[in-house]
Amino acid sequence: MKRIASRPRLGIGVPLVTAALLALCVAPDATALPPAERSWEIQLSMYGWLAGLNADIEAGDVETEIDASFRDILKDLGWAVFGGLEARYERFVLLTDAMGMQLVTDESGSPRTRSFQRFANGPGGDVRFGEYDVHSRLTTWMLDVKPGLRVLSHPIGGLFGGAEQADDPRRLDVDLLAGFRYWNVTNKTGVEIEPASLTVGGQPAALPGLVADRIDIDGKVNVPGAFLRGVDRAKQDTVDWLDPLVGLRVTADVTQRWSVFALGDVGGWGVANASDLTWQAMLGSQLQLSEHWALRAGYRALGVNRDTAFDDGILHGPQIGAVFRF
């Protein structure tokens, strides 16, 4: 199993997100009001997701475990792209989100020795494992498409017994969603291990068959026991699947320019080639800067549980981006 160790590293990402969240929470009223409500609207967003990753990754018979913070991912990140589109016509809504990223990692180690005893009452010995180098390239694409219906849109003032003001556009909106999430995951793993050797009583001896069905290399990478005789190979696996989803989004206007929202969905359920379970949750806020531009920030988590290629995977972390409204 492979674990990407966390290393101290300073960056501007976390302070930037923290500042943005504070700005949203204390956003002052402005003289310029947001655009008036229309029967239709389109919003485009580009964002950065400062996410950590926890997942079990497989490429053929080589299993790798990734347990990485955002700082670890930033160190190994090849490239990443995130964006979304939201459309609404009267009560009909459409939410789409796209994500692509590639992580490139390399783990190597020097020879080490472990004790070995083939039979319970037989002579023991020492197995010397050779040098190893394991390098992997994980490329992940995700497309999320959720059409839905706005089942509630109510003035905020009237919800708490106050008088509804005609010039107050603040509302509470509830959207019911149903759609799909498409995944495409490619993992390419290269393994180089020098042949192992066995000594019994200080004398070289033949390595008797497989020492184990599978072995852990320093607890980071799990490989077949046959690799102890030496290996130099690469394996690439690509898996894609489609997860059906149901979801809910609730949006509330705190002021005429500042709103908060909660978004969640769940799906998979092992339908056809779908995941056993996939889910997503985000709590965030949006500040309208002008008629067309807004700032959006929050915390997001996305999980998927699937036996092959990408098992028990969770991406989670702060997200911040810009929104352009037509």
Image (cartoon, helix red, strand yellow):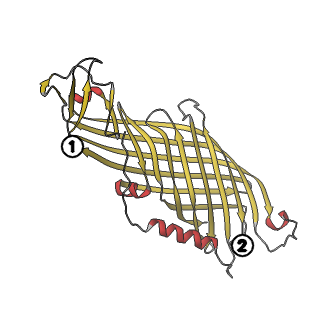
Percent position of residue 72, x then y: 38, 55
Give the SS element for disc 1. Answer: loop
Q: Is residue 237 above or below residue 119?
A: below
**Would residue 201 be found to the left or right of residue 24 on screen?**
left
For the residues carrying marks 2 and 1, which lies nearer the camera in this image? 1
**Tag of residue 140:** none
Q: Residue at x 46, y 53 (%)?
A: 52
Q: Residue 297 lies in what quarter of the image?
A: bottom right
Q: Residue at x 55, y 56 (%)?
A: 84
Give the SS element for disc 2. Answer: loop
**Would residue 310 be found to the left or right of residue 120 on screen?**
right
Q: Is residue 25 above or below residue 273?
A: below
The quarter of the picture where the C terminus appears is: bottom right
**Would residue 279 be found to the left or right of residue 106 on screen?**
right
Q: Which residue is mark 1?
A: 110
Dot 2 or dot 1: first in sequence order is: 1
Q: Residue 120 lies in what quarter of the image?
A: top left
Q: Residue furthest front?
A: 121
The quarter of the picture where the N terminus appears is: top left
Q: Residue at x 45, y 33 (%)?
A: 308
Q: Nearer the viewer, residue 324 or 268?
A: 268
The span from disc 2 to disc 1 (Cα, nearest Å) is: 62 Å
Amino acid type, mark 1: Ser
Within-10-Å neighbours for mark 1: few <14, some 14–19, many 20+: few
Q: Which residue is mark 2?
A: 256
Q: Is residue 259 above or below residue 152?
A: below
Q: Is residue 323 visible?
A: yes
Q: Nearer the viewer, residue 204 or 157?
A: 204
